[in-house]
């Protein structure tokens, strides 16, 4: 069997997605992968169509690991989000082909089910604690047993995880920093006047408010989003101990791996990290030193299923569980890959999910099913997702960027 065509799609149903379709010389046999990288979609699309696609024509799609090694090491310049997202798209499409060829869902190719479904979580947020509480209760009503909670930060204009806040901030600050980019596209939205001290004061109060009203049974956690210094993260993790978080996510920037030792030294709050790593090597110290409890890589940014199952295997003996990244800015094929891997490994922890819009479901049918707090992989051969090319063509790319953050003094901070 041979790869005959590699086609790349950039489409914007609700938000931009990049998809890759690998066609073969077996009539009707193709695979679809997701290669979406929020804010750098066109760079990944170019890496795929201008550099990687020509290298794949004529190769045997069955040789997934060989193609992975060839694309990861053969380019010499290895790693990084753009190349690893492109590689993930290819990898997912190849696993999709292999499953279709075998007549088996991908979880079966990976060794078969280790669980009926994957415990899922979604995002609750709000400006005020009462809004976060209302949002969390709505998710609990829908069956979620694990919920991420984010609230506004006093004096900040816009806050991560509080819908629409960053846009509001850019209305105030974006214009002040130049309202549009070179081709007239929208300036990245700006969260402004964000101060760690204000953040560190409000988060323990939010959990106190929620625990008093929701009790101890519901599993709650929070995403720091890489915004704290090591000692600030250690302080927050320690102060949150009484609220028994499921985990505290991304306390530090990915460049500060050694500093996780400081956080670990000061607190028993479970720690999660990983969405900003781009391959198994970047995860190693946090896993082998047991500095984290959950590895949260994004399967769509670390090179796909082939790499994810290795990361899970590395983590198993260290009792680190998986919690693959699953936000709205990776496509349904990555979400499907998440759940196939979740249901075929022994050390699964929890799976992030989002509710896709009707437009996304139209372009990319087959996202995993959510029932009573759990996600279930498709039983169809392959990943179970697809691309509706005609629908994709209805939604052309729209320039957009991730928000940025500035401190009170106007300096850049981590979003
Ligand atoms: C977040 C992401 O879901 C999460 O854990 O960290 O939503 C992240 O902000 C986006 O993927 C960035 O594009
Ligand atoms: Mg996160």
Image: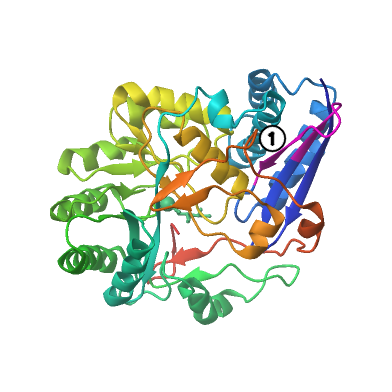
Q: Residue at x 42, y 41 (%)?
A: 118
Quarter of the figure that contains the C terminus: bottom left
Q: Residue at x 74, y 61 (%)?
A: 397
Left or right, 64 with reference to 310: right
* Res 299 seen here: no
Left or right, 246 with reference to 139: left
Q: Where is residue 208 drawn, in percent x and y?
A: 17, 65
Q: Where is residue 318 drawn, in percent x and y?
A: 30, 25
> Foreground residue, 104 or 215?
104
Residue ID for mark 1: 93
Q: Where is residue 340 drawn, in percent x and y?
A: 52, 35
> Foreground residue, 163 or 238?
163
Number of residues whose C-alpha sits closer than 10 Å to that of mark 1, classed few (under 14), some (14–19) or many (20 or more): many
> In the image, is residue 116 above or below residue 1?
below
Quarter of the figure that contains the N terminus: top right
In the rendered picture of this protein, how many numbered marks are placed on residues? 1
Q: Which residue is drawn at 54% across and 56% down?
A: 328
Q: Which residue lies furthest to the left in this view?
A: 242
SS majority, magenta: strand
Q: Is residue 365 magenta?
A: no
> Foreground residue, 146 or 284?
146
Q: Does the magenta stretch include residue 27?
A: yes
Left or right, 19 with reference to 379: right
**Range of magenta residues:** 21-35
Q: Residue at x 70, y 70 (%)?
A: 185
- SS at mark 1? helix
* Res 11 seen here: yes
Q: Where is residue 31 drawn, in percent x and y?
A: 73, 35
Left or right, 403 with reference to 389: left
């Amino acid at each position: 069997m041979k790869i005959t065509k590699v086609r790349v799609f950039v489409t914007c149903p609700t938000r931009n997605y990049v998809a890759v379709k690998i066609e073969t010389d077996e009539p009707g046999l193709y695979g679809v992968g997701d290669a979406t990288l929020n804010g750098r979609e066109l760079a990944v699309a170019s890496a795929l169509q201008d550099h990687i696609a020509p290298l794949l024509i004529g190769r045997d799609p069955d040789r997934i690991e060989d193609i992975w090694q060839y694309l990861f090491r053969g380019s010499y310049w290895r790693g990084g989000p753009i190349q690893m997202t492109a590689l993930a798209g290819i990898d997912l499409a190849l696993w999709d082909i292999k499953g279709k060829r075998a007549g088996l869902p991908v979880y079966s190719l990976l060794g078969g089910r280790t669980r009926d479904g994957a415990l899922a979580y979604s995002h609750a947020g709000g400006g005020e604690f009462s809004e976060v509480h209302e949002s969390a209760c709505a998710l609990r009503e829908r069956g979620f047993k694990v919920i991420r909670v984010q609230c506004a930060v006093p004096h900040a204009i816009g806050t991560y995880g509080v819908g629409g806040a960053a846009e509001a901030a850019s209305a105030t600050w974006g214009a002040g920093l130049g309202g549009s980019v070179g081709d007239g596209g929208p300036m990245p939205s700006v969260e402004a006047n964000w101060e760690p001290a204000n953040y560190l004061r409000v988060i323990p109060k939010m959990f106190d408010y929620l625990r008093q009203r929701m009790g101890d049974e519901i599993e709650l956690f929070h995403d720091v989003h890489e915004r704290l210094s090591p000692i600030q993260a250690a302080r927050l993790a320690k102060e949150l101990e009484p609220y028994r978080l499921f985990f505290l996510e991304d306390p530090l920037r990915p460049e500060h791996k050694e500093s996780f030792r400081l956080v670990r030294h000061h607190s028993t709050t479970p720690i999660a990290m990983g969405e900003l790593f781009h391959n198994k090597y970047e995860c190693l110290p946090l896993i082998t030193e047991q500095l984290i409890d959950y590895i949260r890589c994004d399967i769509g940014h670390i090179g796909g299923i082939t790499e994810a199952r290795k990361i899970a295997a590395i983590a198993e003996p260290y009792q680190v569980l998986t919690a693959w990244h699953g936000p709205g800015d990776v496509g349904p094929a990555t979400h499907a890959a998440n759940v196939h891997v979740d249901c075929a490994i022994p050390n699964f922890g929890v799976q992030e999910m989002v509710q896709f819009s009707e437009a996304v479901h139209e372009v990319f049918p087959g996202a995993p099913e959510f029932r009573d707090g759990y996600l279930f992989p498709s039983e169809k051969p392959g990943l179970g997702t697809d691309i509706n090319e005609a629908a994709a063509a209805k939604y052309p790319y729209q320039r957009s960027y991730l928000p940025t953050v500035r401190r009170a003094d106007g300096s850049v901070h981590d979003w």
